[in-house]
């Protein structure tokens, strides 16, 4: 029986459970309606959000428990 894997943080080298979904879009590469996602643990949420935010890529941050794949 397969067990679902626990999603992990997207920060380099981090193996912590994801608690947040960072929804982003690079307007130079993606159409306006395209959404990409990174996952973040509590520790890396702010850092990853700032990384995307200063580039103008961050669209929203959603609690992982509230996220549905249809949103992205």
Image: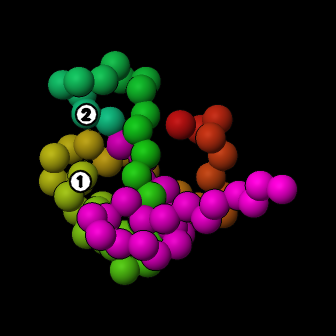
- The overriding secondary structure of the stretch rendered in magenta is loop
Query: Which mark is first along the chain, 2 or 1?
Result: 2
Q: Is residue 33 above or below residue 39?
A: above
Q: Secondary structure at mark 1?
A: helix
Quadrant in which residue 5 is drawn? bottom right
Badge number at residue 26: 2
Left or right of residue 67: residue 62: left
Quadrant in which residue 1 is drawn? bottom right
Name the residue carrying label 1.
53
- In the image, what residue occupies the spot 32% across and 36% down? 25
What is the tally of numbered marks visible in this picture? 2
- In the image, what residue occupies the spot 41% across and 38% down? 36
Badge number at residue 4: none
Q: Secondary structure at mark 2?
A: loop
Quadrant in which residue 29 is drawn? top left
- Is residue 61 visible in the rendered image? The answer is no
- In the image, what residue occupies the spot 61% across and 65% down? 6
């Amino acid at each position: 029986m397969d067990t679902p894997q626990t999603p992990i943080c997207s920060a380099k080298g981090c193996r912590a459970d994801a608690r947040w979904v960072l929804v982003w879009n690079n307007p130079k590469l993606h159409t306006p309606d395209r959404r990409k996602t990174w996952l973040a643990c509590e520790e890396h949420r702010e850092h990853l959000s700032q990384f995307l935010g200063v580039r103008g890529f961050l669209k929203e941050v959603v609690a992982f428990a509230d996220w549905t794949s249809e949103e992205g």
